[in-house]
Image: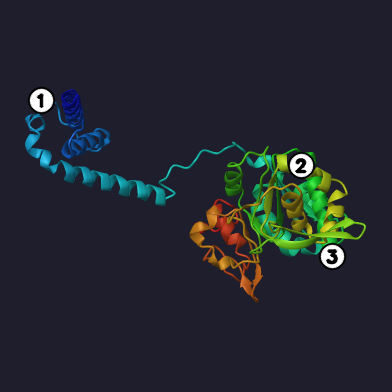
C-alpha cells in the first residue's frame, strides 16, 4: 500500500512540473510577440517627425529619387532633435495665435442682423435738449436716425423738424424721480413692442453709441432667446424689499445693468416681460420694489423671470473712470459717456480733432475718429 501511494505522489509532482513548463513557454512566446510589435523610441520619433513634415507646407518636399532621402539611416540619430524642434515651434505658433485676437479666427455671428433690427431708445428731459441732445444729434444719431427714438417730457418743434415722429413726448414728469424715470421707461417698452424689432436698447442722453460695434455684439446672440446684456454699476447684487400686499414683504437681491451705460434686451425676453412691463404694469412693478427704472428692469428679468445678466465691458457710464479707456480701443466700445467722476471732469482722454474747450465731452473727437468722412470733421481728424 505504501508503494502505491509513493507512485501516485511521484506522478503528481511530474504532472505539475510539466504544466508549469508549458505555461512559462507560452508566456515567453506572447511577450516576445508584443516586444516585436511595438516600435522602438527612435521609430516613434521618426514617424512623428514624418507626420509633421507632411503637414509643413513651408518646407520643400524632396522627390523619391533623391539619394539623400533614400539613404536616411545615418541621419536617424538626429530624428529626436528635429522632432522636438518642430514640436516646440508648432506649440509657439499656436500660443501666438491664441494670444493675438486679430490673428485668431473670429467665430461666425449667430445671427446676421443690421442696424434696422435694433430699436434704440434715448431717455432725456426737455431742459437738456440743447445742452446734451444736440450733441448726440450732430454725432452718432445723425447716422442712425431711423433706428433711434428720443423719449422726452415736453414738446419741441425744433426736435421734431430733425427727427420727426421719432421724437416722443411721454407726458411724464420732468423731475428726476424714480416715478418719472419709470414712467418714461414704460413708454419706451411699449413703443419697442409696437416696432416688432429684434432688439431693444436703452441709453441716456449722455451716451455715445457706436452702432457698428453694437451690431457686431448683438449678432453673437439669438434674438428669440432670453438675452439681457449690459454693465452693472455696483460690485454686488442690489438688495431690495418686495412688497407682496397685505403688509407682507420679502427681501430680494438681483443684478441690473445701469441705464447710464446702456443695456439691450432681446425680443424673445421682452415679450416674456409683458405681464410686468406693458401698459401700466411697469409703474406698478417699480412701485413694488420702490427703485428706479433700470433697477426695475433688472428685477423683472433676474428676480421674476430668472434670466441672468450678461456683463459686457463694452458699455460705459459716467459712474466709471472713462480716462482708463485707451484711444486705441475706442472703436471696440459700444457706448461711451461723460460727466463728473470723484469731483473731476470725466471724459475720454484723447488728442482728437477738437480741443477740450470746444469738445469737453470728447464725443465730437470720437465721432471724427470713427467716421472721418463726416462733413464737419477736419481733414486731419484721422
**Of the image marks 2 and 1, the number of the one nearer the N terminus:** 1
Dot 3, how many residues are within 10 Å of its Cα: few (below 14), some (14-19), or many (20+)? Answer: few
Q: Nearer the viewer, mark 2 or mark 1?
A: 2
Q: Nearer the viewer, mark 3 or mark 2?
A: 2
As drawn, the label of residue 102 is: none
As drawn, the label of residue 65 is: 1
**52 up-or-down from 8: above or below:** below
- The x and y percentages for residue 118 are 68, 43
Are the two marked residues, 2 and 1, in contact with CB atoms closer than 8 angstroms?
no
- The x and y percentages for residue 283 are 86, 54
Q: Nearer the viewer, mark 3 or mark 1?
A: 1
Residue at image position (55%, 50%) is: 373
- The x and y percentages for residue 137 are 70, 55
Classify mark 2: helix, strand or loop: helix
Residue at image position (73%, 65%) is: 131
Q: CA distance from mark 3 to mark 1?
A: 89 Å
**Of the image marks 3 and 2, the number of the one nearer the N terminus:** 3
Classify mark 1: helix, strand or loop: loop
Q: CA distance from mark 3 to mark 2?
A: 30 Å
Q: Is residue 165 left or right of residue 217?
A: right
Are the two marked residues, 3 and 2, in contact with CB atoms closer than 8 angstroms?
no
**Nearer the observer, 85 or 174:** 85
Dot 2, how many residues are within 10 Å of its Cα: few (below 14), some (14-19), or many (20+)? Answer: some
**54 up-or-down from 212: above or below:** above
The residue where tag 3 is placed is 175
Residue 327, visible in the rendered structure: yes
The residue where tag 2 is placed is 272
Query: Which quadrant holds residue 320?
Result: bottom right
Dot 1, how many residues are within 10 Å of its Cα: few (below 14), some (14-19), or many (20+)? Answer: few
Residue 153, visible in the rendered structure: no
**Nearer the observer, 92 or 373:** 92
**Nearer the observer, 369 or 93:** 93
Amino acid at each position: 500500500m505504501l508503494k502505491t501511494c509513493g507512485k501516485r505522489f511521484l506522478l503528481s509532482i511530474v504532472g505539475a512540473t510539466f504544466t508549469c513548463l508549458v505555461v512559462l513557454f507560452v508566456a515567453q512566446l506572447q511577450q516576445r510577440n508584443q516586444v516585436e510589435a511595438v516600435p522602438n523610441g527612435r521609430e516613434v520619433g521618426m514617424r512623428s517627425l514624418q507626420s509633421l513634415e507632411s503637414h509643413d507646407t513651408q518646407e520643400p518636399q524632396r522627390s523619391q529619387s533623391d539619394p539623400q532621402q533614400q539613404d536616411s539611416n545615418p541621419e536617424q540619430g538626429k530624428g529626436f532633435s528635429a522632432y522636438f524642434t518642430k514640436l516646440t515651434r508648432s506649440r509657439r505658433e499656436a500660443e501666438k495665435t491664441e494670444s493675438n485676437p486679430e490673428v485668431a479666427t473670429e467665430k461666425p455671428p449667430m445671427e446676421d442682423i443690421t442696424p434696422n433690427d435694433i430699436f434704440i431708445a434715448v431717455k432725456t428731459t426737455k431742459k437738456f435738449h440743447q445742452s446734451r441732445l444736440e450733441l448726440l444729434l450732430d454725432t452718432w444719431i445723425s447716422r442712425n436716425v431711423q433706428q433711434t427714438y428720443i423719449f422726452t417730457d415736453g414738446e419741441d418743434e425744433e426736435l421734431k423738424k430733425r427727427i420727426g415722429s421719432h421724437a416722443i413726448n411721454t407726458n411724464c414728469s420732468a423731475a428726476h424721480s424714480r416715478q418719472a424715470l419709470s414712467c418714461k421707461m414704460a413708454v419706451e417698452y411699449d413703443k419697442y413692442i409696437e416696432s416688432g424689432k429684434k432688439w431693444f436698447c436703452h441709453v441716456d442722453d449722455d451716451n455715445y453709441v457706436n452702432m457698428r460695434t453694437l451690431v457686431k455684439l448683438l449678432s453673437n446672440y439669438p434674438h428669440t432667446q432670453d438675452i439681457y446684456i449690459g454693465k452693472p454699476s455696483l460690485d454686488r447684487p442690489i438688495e431690495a424689499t418686495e412688497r407682496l400686499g397685505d403688509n407682507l414683504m420679502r427681501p430680494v437681491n438681483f443684478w441690473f445693468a445701469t441705464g447710464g451705460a446702456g443695456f439691450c434686451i432681446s425680443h424673445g425676453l421682452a415679450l416674456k416681460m409683458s405681464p410686468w412691463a406693458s401698459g401700466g404694469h411697469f409703474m406698478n412693478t417699480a412701485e413694488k420694489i420702490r427703485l428706479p427704472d433700470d433697477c426695475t428692469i433688472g428685477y423683472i428679468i433676474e428676480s421674476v423671470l430668472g434670466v441672468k445678466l450678461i456683463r459686457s465691458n463694452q458699455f460705459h457710464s459716467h459712474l466709471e473712470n472713462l480716462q482708463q479707456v485707451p484711444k486705441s480701443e475706442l472703436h471696440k466700445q459700444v457706448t461711451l459717456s461723460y460727466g463728473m467722476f470723484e469731483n473731476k471732469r470725466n471724459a475720454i482722454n484723447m488728442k482728437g480733432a477738437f480741443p477740450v474747450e470746444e469738445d469737453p465731452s470728447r464725443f465730437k473727437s470720437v465721432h471724427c475718429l470713427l467716421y472721418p468722412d463726416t462733413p464737419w470733421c477736419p481733414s486731419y481728424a484721422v
